[in-house]
Amino acid sequence: MKKTPVFLDSLVTDMLRLRAICPFSWRVFQFRPISCEPLIIQMNKCTDEEQIFDFIERNKAILSEKQVGCAFDMLWKLQKQKTSLLKNIEDVRDHPQFLTLRNLATNKFKLMNDDTLVNVLHITQRFDIKLLSEFSSCLADQRLYFSPLMGKIADIVHRNLETTQDLSSLSVLMVNISSLISRHFQQQLVNKTELLFDTIDSSEVNVATRITRFLRNIKYCYQPLLEKCNNIFLSNVDQLDLDSISKILRLYKLLHFNSFEFTMMAKKKLTEMIPLCNHPASFVKLFVTLGPIAGPEEKKQLKSTLLLMSEDLTGEQALAVLRAMEDMESRNSHLIKRVTSVLHKHLDSYKPLELLKITQALTFLRFQRKEFSAKLRELLLSHLKISFIPTEVSFLVYAISLLPSPHLDEVGISRIEAVLPQCDLNNLSSFATSVLRWIQYDHMYLDSITGKQLKLLQKLDHYGRQRLQHSNSLDLLWEELKSVRGNTFPESLLEETIATLQHFVDEINYINVVEIASFISNTDYLSTLLLDRIASVAVQQIEKIHPFTILAIILPFSTLNYDPPQRDEFFGTCVQHLNSYLGILDPLMLVYLGFSLATLQYFPEDLLKSIFNIEFLSRLDSQLEILSSSLSARVQFHLMELNRSICLECPEFQIPWFHDRFCQQYNKGIGVMNGAQQQIYKMLAEVLGGINCVKASVLTPYYHTVDFECILDKRKKPLPYGSHNTALGQLPEMPWEPNTEIVGSRLPPGAERIALEFLDSKSFCRNIPHMKGKFAMKKRHLEILGYRVIQISQFEWNSMALSTKDARMDYLRERIFGEVKS
């Protein structure tokens, strides 16, 4: 066996601390030999390794740090002079006097300057990379991620990456240097890791964890590597303890990576630990890890046990519990009060980012206590007044904007203005969201918007535009945009962002296409130039795109209701790329994929039949148990929408409708109309000749909800409904049987059923009045059900042309009867 390198963590750490405290003293006052030149001259005369090792053995008691460095230099120079066949690196590394030399380097460590130290490490690394990885970990333990030494280590790794074969040591280095390296170097490390992955044993959980952590550090959800790491975790799940499972699930969450199999195995193993964790520290970790994926019974058990321990929680543990409750969507008032009482006691000790997390969690959990909120606001403001870091200022302002009184005083505004020139797009987007929330609050409760608020928005817009206009590559721009959710951008800044992305459209490729597509999905901004490029990249480079990311590529087309020029080739290529993976795709992802394609009127039979079968639906039920209640409801609703779409648009597939009970439960809360709908309802009653000639909030077969319905006979005269008409705010009735004959059902000969839909701004793309995907799909479905569909756009209804009641009445008559008032 190879001997372990002897740069001990504790010694290196002590030396680093000493360097930080007194960086010059040891070099000035340490004893030095009068002259070290004779020894170095002797060393330079050595012609092979054995002569150097003999020299080391004879002089080890008197060698200085400079001479130790020279010895390493000589050993490497001799290696460089040899051909690859004559190199004897392993012999040198395993020689007893090489160990002596490393011991001497350890003892002389504090005397070496940085260049000598890194040079020694560099040379030693050529014999054994493990030594370099251990030293990088010592720096990491001291939080010296951005130190010059770590930078030099990163450079060594970069220069020797091609010849590196030890993935275990490389994975340590990757994590430790991840804060310093370029996007190009990140990709090189990912590629190297893929090449070396099969060289590690399937039991190397720590290596797989470090690789996952590296991907998290560089914010890169690289599916091929994550799948390989996940397979190692799955094959070693019995050996994973609470800490390991907690770390893996946290990394997966941050990377937005889903592994149904690992989560289910983790849930089973963690559930077995509940009776074994009887200490607050271990139980809190179990609560935080298991809570978000636990079933109802496990959650109940976790909460009841935590209530008994709540008084013993530390401030850090209370914060961890609160954030877990946010993930669990648990609004247990008794437990929230207990946890917040602990938080209140420790509020003064929390850092700004922790105060933000507390504010976000309590806002989500709808916790309101004036005394607590006032103290929180006071602390956030005090941190804001002294902060000068743009990111910190942005999240302090964001936290304040979430509180009951979100506006800022002069000091707060001046602090924002002071950091604006240094802000990236993520900071500017956060500021804009906060200021808009602040404006909305003041307008609602104080009925005023100040000039200072508007000036601040203008400055945010100015610096955002300036930053975008100075972007000179898509890679650099994306470093700022990848943490931004497109739906939080103010209108003008979003327009400039899309224009900048369009400028770099030719730089979109298989590496960044998924991220760009995801960003566009969130913006609701239709750019045909960008979408056409995404489709083109997918078609031309599909083999380089991971199948599990196909959903993200299709999503913007579905959301924005856009067919690229090569529509059939694009969708066909994407689906074909997925076909062999249908059996192992995450159930949630497959449901979303099927729904997205159905929105676009694309119905691949193999994919749909892989969803609508007993085995898949059973797996989906298991997954729904570990999702939050809101996400579980969204998934079930999308499955219903997909089921409805197939029944209406592809009856030849003979997939049965099985969502009656779900829809009846879901539709209990509908029937309440907003102000605009009530206004239209009253006008429709006038236009149609009475309240009994229009029905509001109608449920159709397959449970679409129609805002208003009326029936015209063959002479275009309104037909009255019976006394069962829906009053304002009441639960609507279902007039037809779900599976009756659809077209012309229960209508007199020649009559037509009309659906009137009021579409607000959410129904359209953000930049143009182009209807989004799911609203276009609803129109198709209503037409299949036999309706003539009239869609009333908010933009039309609130336009200058329809600014009077008479104009609106004429508009309704024209849309319904085709009449134009002379």
Image (tube, helix red, strand yellow):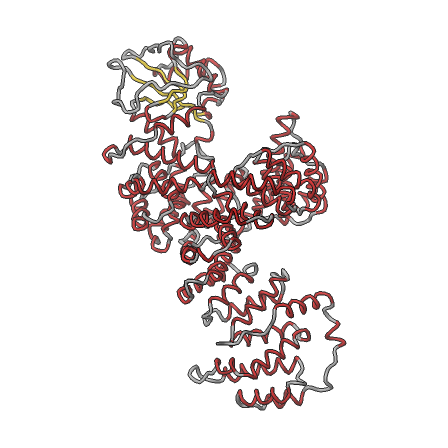
- Foreground pick, 502 / 526: 526
Position of residue 524 relative to residue 446, above or below, is: below
Position of residue 774 relative to residue 693, above or below, is: below
Q: Position of residue 41 (x, y in %)?
A: 63, 89
- On screen, residue 671 versus residue 746, left or right, reads right
Q: Position of residue 744 (x, y in %)?
A: 26, 19
Q: Quadrant of residue 397?
A: top right
- Foreground pick, 814 / 685: 685
Q: Quadrant of residue 339?
A: top right
Position of residue 669 relative to residue 543, above or below, is: above
- Foreground pick, 643 / 268: 268
- On screen, residue 27 versus residue 268, left or right, reads right
Q: How many marks?
A: 0
Residue 501 visible from this viewpoint: yes
Q: Quadrant of residue 460?
A: top right
The C terminus is located in which quarter?
top left
Q: Position of residue 297 (x, y in %)?
A: 47, 39
Q: Position of residue 22 (x, y in %)?
A: 74, 68
Residue 461 visible from this viewpoint: no
Q: Residue at x 71, y 38 (%)?
A: 378
Position of residue 16 relative to residue 285, above or below, is: below
